[in-house]
Amino acid sequence: MADRSRCKRVARIRTKMAAAVELTALIGAGQVVIAVGLAATVGQFEEDALVSITQRRESIARPAGLVVADETYSVQPGTSDPAPADQ
């Protein structure tokens, strides 16, 4: 009986992984990786959890003045290029 239950769980995992691969082809790996991480964080492993998470993330508008820290911008003081000496 335990083997039958294990087989069903494996089949569900394979189905969900196949859905994640299909979603990756549609929206890109980066978005799916974020969705998988969020799903794991909150314990959402239902059939359409990844689609729901990606749709929700797309629906949230970013504020106009939002600055995303990256390699070209740092919020850490003193890390920008120094001003030229002649100024």
Image (cartoon, helix red, strand yellow):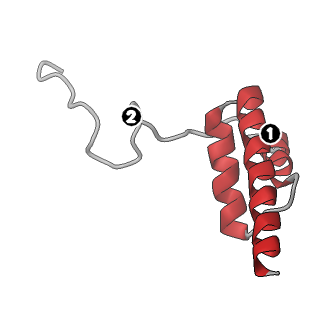
Q: Are marks 2 and 1 in contact (CB under 8 Å)?
A: no
Q: Amino acid at mark 2?
A: Glu
Q: Secondary structure at mark 1?
A: helix
Whole-number angstrom distance, CA of label 2 to CA of label 1: 24 Å
Coordinates of residue 14 in the picture (x, y in percent) = 75, 51
The front one of 38 and 9 is 9
Disc ID at residue 69: none
Which residue is at the front of the view, 82 or 30? 30
Give the vertical position of 36 relative to 21 (above or below). Answer: below
Judge whether 15 appears above or below 63 on screen.
below
Give the residue pinned by disc 1: 58
Q: What percent of the width, then of the height, locates residue 69?
A: 48, 41
Point out the image quarter for the C terminus.
Answer: top left
Q: Is residue 85 left or right of residue 77?
A: left
Q: Earlier in the sequence, mark 2 or mark 1?
A: 1
Q: Position of residue 76 (x, y in %)?
A: 35, 49
Query: Compared to 10, does 57 lie above or below?
Result: above
Crowd band around label 2 with a 10 angstrom C-alpha radius: few (<14), some (14–19), many (20+)? few
- From the top left corner, tell me how far across and down residue 21 is, in percent: 71, 37
Q: Which mark lies nearer to you, 2 or 1?
A: 1
Identity of the residue furthest to the left in this view: 85
Q: Which residue is mark 2?
A: 71
Q: Residue at x 78, y 65 (%)?
A: 7
Query: Visible in this render: residue 11?
Result: yes
